[in-house]
Image: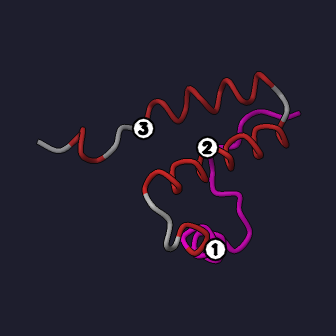
């Protein structure tokens, strides 16, 4: 597998985002969090490459939630 792609790479990204939001619609916070966890595991399994997955974990960890960066 190739290196981790961090540049925009989703066809019809706005449509995907709308689908993602629609999938979460009506869920409790707990159910929404569980859905996100399952989605991460499904996509991680699809990627399969531990090096790429490790790089993705590191890249995601660099992003702080807005609430932590606001003063």
Label at residue 37: 2
Q: At 66% from the left edge and 70% from the top edge, which residue is drawn?
A: 16
Q: Which residue is mark 3?
A: 63
13 to 63, vertically: above or below: below
Residue at (53, 55) in percent of width and height:
31
Q: Is residue 2 left or right of residue 60?
A: right
Give percent across and percent down for residue 66. 28, 47
Quarter the C terminus occupies: top left
**Residue 18, quarter of picture:** bottom right
Q: Is residue 26 left or right of residue 2?
A: left
| Part of the protein shown in magenta | 1-21
If the image is split into quadrants, where does the N terminus sit? top right
Earlier sequence position, callout 2 versus callout 1: 1
Instruction: Give the mark nearer the N terminus: 1 vs 3.
Output: 1
Q: CA distance from mark 1 to mark 3?
A: 23 Å
Tell me which residue sits at (24%, 45%) in the image: 67
Q: Height in image: 71 above or below 19?
A: above
Q: Are marks 1 and 3 in contact (CB under 8 Å)?
A: no
Query: Are there few (<14), some (14-19), or many (20+) residues within 10 Å of tag 2?
Result: few
The secondary element bearing badge 3 is classed as loop
Instruction: Check disc 1 and report the residue beneath it.
Output: 19
Q: Are marks 2 and 1 in contact (CB under 8 Å)?
A: no
């Amino acid at each position: 597998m190739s290196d981790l792609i961090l540049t925009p790479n989703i066809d019809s990204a706005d449509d995907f985002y709308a689908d993602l939001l629609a999938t979460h619609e009506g869920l409790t916070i707990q159910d929404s969090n569980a859905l996100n966890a399952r989605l991460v595991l499904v996509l991680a399994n699809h990627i399969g490459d531990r090096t790429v997955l490790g790089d993705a974990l590191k890249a995601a960890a660099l992003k702080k939630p807005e609430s932590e960066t606001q003063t």
